Structures are given as structure tokens and as C-alpha cells.
Image: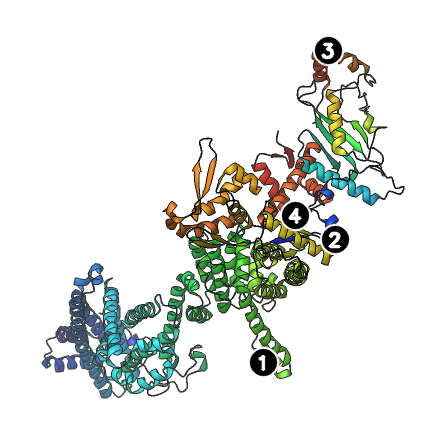
Amino acid sequence: MAATDSSSSSPMCNLSILDSLDEILVGEMTDSWNAFCLATDTLLGGDSDLSFASDFVSHVRNLCSRGLEKLIVEHFLCSMEDIFEKNGASRFWKHFDAYSNSAVLDMEKLDQQGEMQDVLHKALEEILSEKQYQEKCLLMLVHALEMCRENNPNEQTYSESERNYLFSKYQLTVSSVLMASLPRHFPDVLHWYFKGRLEELSAMTATGCDYDNKLHVDDGMDLDCKTGEMDIDGTHTILGNNKLVRNIGEVVRDLRSLGFTSIAEDAYASAIFLLLKAKVHELAGDEFRFSVLESIKGWIQAVPLQFLHALLSYLGDSKSYGSPSSGLKSPLASHPSFRYYGTGIPSEGLVRWQLRLEYFAYETLQDLRIAKLFEIIVDYPDSSPAIEDLKQCLEYTGQHSKLVDSFIAALKYRLLTAGASTNDILHQYVSTIKALRTIDPAGVFLEAVGEPIREYLRGRKDTIKCIVTMLTDGAGGNPNGQGSTGDSLLEELNRDEENQENSGLDDDVNTDDKQAWINAQSWEPDPVEADPLKGGRYRRKVDILGMIVGIIGSKDQLVNEYRVMLAEKLLNKSDYDIDSEIRTMELLKIHFGESSMQRCEIMLNDLIDSKRTNANIKTTIKQQLQPVADIGEHELSLDNLNATIISSNFWPPIQDEALNIPGPVEQLLSDYAKRFHEIKTPRKLLWKKNLGTVKLELQFEDRMLQFTVTPLHASIICQFEDQTSWTSKNLAAAVGVPVDVLNRRIYFWINKGILAESVEESGDHKFTLVESLVDSGKSGVNSGSCEELLVGDEDAERSVASVEDQLRKEMTVYEKFITGMLTNFGSMALERIHNTLKMFCIGDPAYDKSLQQLQSFLAGLVAEEKLELRDGMYFLKK
Amino acid sequence: MATVNNTHHQDSNPNTPAAAAPAKQTVPTPKAVDTQSVLKRLQSELMALMMGGDSEISAFPEEDNIFCWKGTITGSKDTVFEGTEYKLSLSFPSDYPYKPPKVKFETACFHPNVDVYGNICLDILQDKWSSAYDVRTILLSIQSLLGEPNISSPLNNQAASLWGNQEEYRKMVEKLYKPSA
């Protein structure tokens, strides 16, 4: 028993007091102390018998007068802690023992939730009553101490701060006791509790107060005003008076008074976030055609924020801070989002909450959209609202790199596979460009995303062809969309460009100081990920065509492929109608320049000239022949003939195939050619008889059929006019083509049921004309599929050498040159081969490849075992 | 039907065989021969040779001089030179094709009409030259000379005398044959 520094007023140890103590005094003090201890125990024991109270007070007073005030307080607090630990805390935790297995909590049964709710309420009630009782005791002690002070004039009166100190110390004791014994599952219990309550609340708001989320999905445009008006007299009042909110508020308050402030906040915060996440998923889901961001924001205002508002104001935290500082306002909350909280000015806590919730919503939506970006882009432009949402989210969260990584992974997995057609890949590429252009006008992320696609497409052989088709064909190169005459990509691009240019023009016109200032203010830095080497954002304006050409490497290849396709198209025309081709050509000229399109232009001019010349020749021949008038004989007049006259130097190489055509037609052709020569001396016509189309009408005993076929097909069937049965060898000789070509082509007529094939004993095939349908019952069956067969057939029989053929031809020349030089020089290094080719391979085609291209070509020859590569020198493989 | 307007561009049309195969017309010799036309002629000869697809003869200009070519011929089948390969050098005069090129064996060749320095005695390379000949015909002539020597005017008497004994001759060819690396 030590009474050291008894006087709180004296800062120094007054040891002389000890000397004045005699034994009697000590004995009295001991007695008094023991009695005090006993009284304390009884008092705190909880039998709330107030008769002890006066006893207790007198003991306290007694001890106080001897300056033992500090000791009393310490002891009292200690005892309270012991008892609270024994009675309060351990009993409190026992309530939750049933939930110690977290698996139990996962089962979200309603009755169990209700049970848990009850348990929590009961436990809180119990422990709080215990706490209240102890506080009452503490108050009693304080009163006693106050009285002592009052009686002793030397002492200062018991101050408010000392009193607060005692209570806060007690509060600390309580929470530390609870914290020290906190079971691990308690936060879970709280989490599930809040989750259950919030869901209940959300359901109530959804149905109870006319707040219908679906309504907002449908007309998200006037969402702001609607929520605003409704909430003033709807949600706010309902939530404000809501029993449920009060219940939750009580629980939170109770938990706070037990020192669980942060645990409680964590629990309801995580519950809110969980609910928000579920809401975002529910609203956004797989729906890309509507913007959901506004409805999510609306929901945040309507449910969690209202709840928090009610909760915070219930707890008394919602103090107004004068005017909210602008820095705390949500940067995206453009509308006055807080006007419906009654008071008008939100508390700082609420603003923080809103920021947190909105960020979380943005991030959740962004993650959701990024994960589905591939599908979204497939649906583009229908899905542009989703893209718009994503853009806003990314502006807020700044997690662009996440998008790039995830999208590239999706592309590699889903698009850049052998199963995807080149067309599909190209379309997705274009959609990607368009979609990402919205998100990232500078094209920085697009660069990263586009590269794998470009890389992959370069490995595909039909890429160039598909690109050209896509650019120039209305159907977008999609074989399924033959009927639709949608605009070609090129036209679309052109339209875009015009728009861009117009807006750009405006900028230039208004370059007064004011406008310059506005421009300067709207300047934004490049995204951090931007590659400084690639120039500023304005120079890097996304150019879809440029990005497409970028796949191939050079526009020349593209133009070349277009030339071949154009030639094919023009040669198959019979009516000189080239309006759409001219239009496409003009568009291409805008993008690729006049000079690169020169040859194509000449081709089109050939068609225009042909039309004129054709008409001219016909009229003049008619005039000449009129007096003779002997052309009725075969019913073949020049009216039936239209010629396309081409300047073959400017056309791609044309497949030449010898062909005997029927005499009268031959005669017609030579007449035509003669007349041409007369008109256009010294020019002469050389017919390419295998090209063009022939319209035929076949008359049989019982039917009449019309066809549009190639000249070869026509010649074949003409042979059956005089002789109804031919062996393949004879027929081939008559038509003037090799037997295998004939066999291939004649299937057209066999499939039409017009010819029948039989194998003779000599092994020769024999074809016979089927004069009437009765002879062959099968013709009707076959007629359905032959159309496709013809299409497939004609695919193989192109009239113009394709770009690949040309390339192969070029490469054969190079190969021969390389073989030639290696034969004579033994071995050569890459560089020397390159230089030698450059020097001597200057005919047609001239060597125009780069060192790298040559290297890969040589590598190909090495792989074919034609060459060998040793120590950087190439050898012929012997 | 499509036709070809085959008029004023006829001579420059690279697809016509006339341009690829050099002019076969005989010598109305213009006095001034410009280098440009020689170059053109050699160029087209090279193209024709490369595209000709002869596997037993070959020639190609040296790296930077189209007037100096290296040639390669292989010994024809069923001759004593079967399985051998000989390198030649061809040097064209500036008034080619009105004058023949100088052709020499680079690889030592044991042959009645080839001397130890590789000089060749072949009429078309001397007095019987015509501008209708080209690299290809020269090489083919030399190749056939290997199997059918002109014994009457030998440059290598030993070879000429041994020619009668084909078996011995073959052995001699094998012994003296030093293929270039």
C-alpha cells in the first residue's frame, strides 16, 4: 500500500506527508480501503442495490480526504474492466458461436438471416445494458469525487475535462476488451447482416416508392430531373422515416458505442459495394445497346447514398460544413446531385461516399465492358452506347492499359485463329478502329491493339484481295450480303473525311485571338503511354484507310490488286455501264493520288472509248452492208456483238487461250475488226476470243433455254448443232482446246442436263446431246445445284492473271537469275546477289525487292532444297 | 468479246516474244555502234538465257560489268566429258554483236581444239561469226565441240592423237580435270 503522490495539485512529491503518518492513521486508511474495494465489487457485481451506493460514496469520500483519489479511480476502472470482460464480452461473443463456421454464413437462407439478425440485436442489447450499468456506476463515482472536491475548499472543483477523460478511458477499456477477444467470424457476421438489410432496403426502394430502374433503362435521357423530383418527396421521406434504416442505424450506433466503428463501417461499406456491383452487373450485363452509366449513377443516388444519408444523419454525423469545397465535388457529377437531400448541402462524409461509390461503379462497369469488349466491337456500331460508357469510365479510372492487355488477349484467342475468315478479321479490325477511336482519339491504344491484327493479317494470302473487295464493293466483300447494296467502306471513309475536314475548316477560319485562346485551353496532353516518336496527337489523327494500307505495307500492292479486280469486272461487263467503277476510282484517287491510279483510269477510259467506237462501227457497217442484205441467213447481225477494246499495255496480263469459235461468229468478228481498222488506221483489232460472255438461246424439240456463258461454253454447245454426238478428243480438236480443259468445261452442260456423258470402250468419253427431257429424267434434279457449280467453276477460270500469279511469275524470273549467277560464280553472299539482281534483272518484271524480301525469298529456296546457305554464302544444291 | 488494241505500242510490249529474243536478222552493219544498244542487246540475251531453261549451259555477267561474263558448260552425256563442268570467260567487244566475243576456258580442258591457255579454236568465234549468234548459241556450240572435236586443225596435238582411243582419253580427262571450287 503506497500513497505516493496523493495531491494532484502538487507537481512535486511531498515526501514529508509520509512522515506525518502514524500507525493509527494507516490502520484507518487500510480499513477504509478494504471497505471501498468491497463496495466497488458489490456495486459492479450488478445487484443494483442502491443501498450500497451511499456506503460506497462515504468510502470514497473518506479515502479522498486522505488524498487517495487517483488510486480509487484506478482501482475502480480495473474492476470494471475485469467484470466487463467476464460478464459482458465473453457473453457477447457466445451469441455468435453458432456462426463461427463461415460456411454456415454462406447459406443465405432467409430464416437464418432473420435468426442472425435477432441474435445480433439481442447480443447488442445485452452488452449495452451491461455497459450502461457500468457507466451509471462510473457516474456515481464521479459524483462522489465531485462532492469531495466541493467539501474541500483547497481543491479545485472537479472539471468537465477530467470527467470526459474518465469516460473516454472507460470507452477505450470497453473497446479494447472487445477487440482483444474479437472472434474472427464477427466481421463476416456483420457483413452478412448489412448485406441482408441493404438488399431488403434496395428491394423496398425499387418497389415501394415508384422508383423503377427499368424505367430509367428505357429512357435514360431525362433521368436526372426525374430522380430529382421524385426523390424530394419520395425516397427521402420514405428512407428518412424508414424503420429499417432506423434499425440499421441503431445497430451501427450500438456497434460504434462498443468501439466497432471501423469494423461496422467496413461491413456496411463492403455490403454496399457488393450490392452496387450486383446492380452494375444486372444493369449492364450483356446489353450493349443502351448506355447504363446514367442509370447506375441514378441508382447510386437513389439507394446507397440515400441510405448513407439517412444513416449518417441518424447517427448525427451529417453536420453541415457551410459550403462544400469544390474540390470535394465529384468531377463527373455535372448535375447538382445533392439538391434532393432536404438541407441542400451535403455533409463532407456523404460527398466522400459518393466519390467512392462512383469510382467503384466506374471501375466495375469498366471491368465488365473490357471483359466483353470483343463482343461489343463485334456489335459495333449498335453497341456504341457501351463504348461511350467505357470511355467515360476510363476517363475516370485511367486504366487504359487494362483494356489493351485484355483486348489483345481476346483477339488472339478468338479472332486471330485459322478458323476466322479474313473478311471477318478485317471487319473486326475496322470496327475496332472505329470503336477505339471514340475512346482514344489520339490512337495510342489503337496502335497497340491493332498491331497483332496487322501482324496476323500479313500472314494471310487473301488479305489484299479482301481489303480491296471491302474497300470497293458495296456488299463489303461479304459473300452472304450479295443482295444488300450498302455503301462501300471507301464511301464511308470519304464521308467521314468530309465531316472531319469541314470541322477542321471551321477551326482554321476562326483563328482570332479568342478562338486561339479557347483552343489552347482545350489542349490536352497525350496519354502517358503515347510514344513520343510517333508525333503529336494532331499529326496522329486516326486514319482508317491508312491503318488498313498499313497491313499490307504499301499502297502500290493494293492498287495493283484493285487493277486486277477492276480488269476482271470490266471484262465481264456487256453494257459499258461503269458509273459505279468511276465513282470508286475517283474515291481511290482522293486517297492514293492520281498517279498511282493512272493505269486504272486508262482501263476505264478504254471502256468509255469502246462504247463510242462500238456504236460507230456498227452504224457504219450497217450502212455498207445494207445494199448487199444477206445477213438474215444466220440471224447473226452486228447487233448481237459488242466489243470491249482495251489498251493491253495498261491492263494486267490477260489469260490467252486459243479457241475455235463457230464460223459465222468468226466472220462477224473479222468484219468488225476490218471496220475498226478502216476507222482507226493504223490500229488493228486482235480478238481475245476466250473472254467475254455469250448470251445463248437453245431450242430443243420440247423446250427453249436461255444461258449466259463463256465463249468456250458457247463454242462447245455450238458443235452439237450439226452433230449430236462427239467423242471428247474430237470435240476438243473442233473447239481448239486441250482435252482436259474441254472435260472440265463440258460439265457445265452435262449438269444442265443438255449433254449426256458416256464412256466408250476405247476409254474415250462420249458426249451426246439430250434432245428432249424425256430422254433424261434426271435433268430436273440437277438443275438446282449447277448454278453454284458454275460459280465455282468461273472462280477458277479468271480471265486476268491474279496478283499472286504475277508475283509467282516475278519470283520465277528471280529464281532463274539466281540459279544462273550461282552456277557461274559458285557461291555468293546475300548482298552480292541483291546487287547483281539490281544490276542485271532489269527487264520485265524488273527486280524491285528489298534486301529483306530477297532474303526471305532465298530462305524459301533453301527450304525447298534448291539452295544451300553456309557461312552467309548461298550455293546451289547439287 | 474482249479484244486487244494492238497498235502503236507493239514494239515496246514486253510480252511479245520479239523483244525477248534478239533480232535474228543478218548484218546490215551500221558504222556507229552506240553502247546503249550493245547493253540492251546483252541485257536481252541474258534474259533469254535465264528464261531459256538450258540446264547444261549457263552464263552470267560479272558483278559490275555486263561486257564480261562467266560461263559454265557441262560435258554432254555419252561423251568422254560426261560429268565434267567447265568454266569459261566471255568478253564482249564494244561493237558486239558485229564482232564476236572472246571466249576462253577458265578450267583446264584436255581437248584437241583447246590450248593450255584455254584458247578455243572454233570457226564461229572467228571468221564464221554472225550477229545472229548469241551467248546461248556460242555456249551450245562449245558444248558440242567437246564431244565432236575438229581433229584436222588441233591446238593440242596430244589430245588430238589420243582422241582415237576413247577409253584412254576418258582416263586422261579425269586425270586432268580440276573442277573449280
Q: State whether residue A66 is above or below residue A93.
A: below
Of the two numbered discs 4 and 1 on the same chain, state the one appearing first in sequence. 1
Q: Chain of mark 2?
A: B
**Residue A379's x, y, as percent?**
42, 64
Q: Amino acid at mark 1?
A: Ile
Q: Quadrant of residue A20?
A: bottom left
* A671 in relation to A487, above or below: above
**Mark 3 belongs to which amino acid?**
Asn
- State the residue at coordinates (46%, 57%): A479
Could you tell me how far apart the alpha carbons at marks 3 and 1 are, in whole angstroms? 103 Å
Foreground residue among A437 and A61 = A437
Q: Type of residue at label 2?
A: His
Q: Secondary structure at mark 3?
A: loop
Which circle, 2 or 4, is nearer the viewer? 2
Query: Is residue A433 left or right of A344 when viewed as pictured?
Result: right
Q: Looking at the rendering, in which quadrant would you find the C terminus of chain A?
A: top right
Secondary structure found at label 4: loop
* Discs 3 and 2 carry the same chain letter: yes
The residue that disc 1 covers is: A518
Residue placed under numbered mark 2 in the picture: B8
How far, Cα to Cα, is label 4 from label 1? 50 Å
How far apart in space, not on screen, are marks 2 and 4 (Cα)? Answer: 31 Å
Question: Numbered disc 1: what chain?
Answer: A
Q: CA distance from mark 1 to mark 2?
A: 62 Å
State the residue position of label 4: A849
**Closer to us: A405 or B49:** B49
